[in-house]
Image: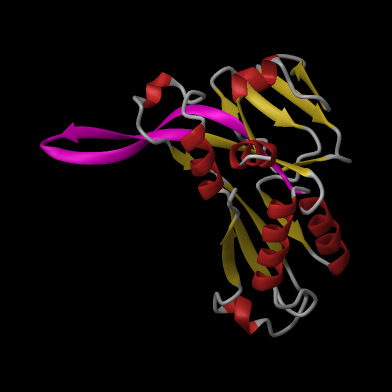
Amino acid sequence: MSPNKASCSRVKVTELQEFLRDPPPGFLVEPLEGDSCGYRVHSDPEINLILIDDSDSFCRGKIVFQNSLGRTVRMHNLWEYTSLRKSLLSKRIYLLTSACKYNCDTNNNRAKDEFEVVNQYVVCINGSDPLIKWQMARGLDWTISSVAGESYTVEIDLTEALQSWATTNSHVCTDKLIKAEPVWRDAAFTLKYHSDALFDFPYWFGFSKRSFKVKLT
């Protein structure tokens, strides 16, 4: 398998509007009931791990992903951690990210750099892919020295994976990016484990806040 084809099997990036119009196998999209404007997205929790907050919205209305754990996943015991770790290393992981560009606005002769959201994308990372699985397992082992005895916060960053994908799939990004490399926001998710240990000094002093990156190559 060529490097490009292997990368495509590890990550799939779909424009949000396209995802809602033509959802992939295992997903069902339906309009929200009542006066609410938006969509409800159903998925199979046996094969998909959805990490998207309900507050994430689109210009056409609110989008609610059923069975989503949210972008920040909280755990309170060893069983919850073990279950989540198994899901991360075996299921397809879904995030909602934003492709942005720098917007320089001049006001009173002062330049102000801001991020302008150009489009939103549903990102799927294949947790069962050997490379992704190895990176996830290694990252979790490195960032989590113990589970039962301390609290911790771990951020898993997919920014470099998306940057690598965008380099070889620039035609997918909208022309509104003006051919500039997109700035990816919300391309990460966080695991928080809360221990009931009485003296959790590493967490109190910020030593248990760590992160690792997931790459395509």
In depth, the one of 177 and 131 nearer the eye is 131
In this rendering, the answer to whether 129 lies above or below 13 is below
Q: Position of residue 119 (x, y in %)?
A: 49, 26
Q: Position of residue 127 (x, y in %)?
A: 74, 48
User: Going 42% across and 34% down the picture, which residue do you hit?
Assistant: 100
Residue 103 is drawn in which quadrant? top left
Left or right: residue 72 versus residue 174 is right
Q: Position of residue 75 (x, y in %)?
A: 77, 61
Q: Position of residue 105 (x, y in %)?
A: 23, 33
User: Going 83% across and 67% down the picture, which residue do you hit?
Assistant: 77
User: Going 66% across and 65% down the picture, which residue do you hit?
Assistant: 139
In this rendering, the answer to whether 19 lies above or below 46 is above
Is residue 13 among what the camera can see? yes
Left or right: residue 107 versus residue 192 is left
Residue 46 is drawn in which quadrant? top right
Outermost residue toward the front? 1
Tell me the quarter of the image containing the N terminus: top right
Left or right: residue 60 versus residue 33 is left
Residue stretch rendered in magenta on the structure:
99-127
In depth, the one of 36 and 85 nearer the eye is 85
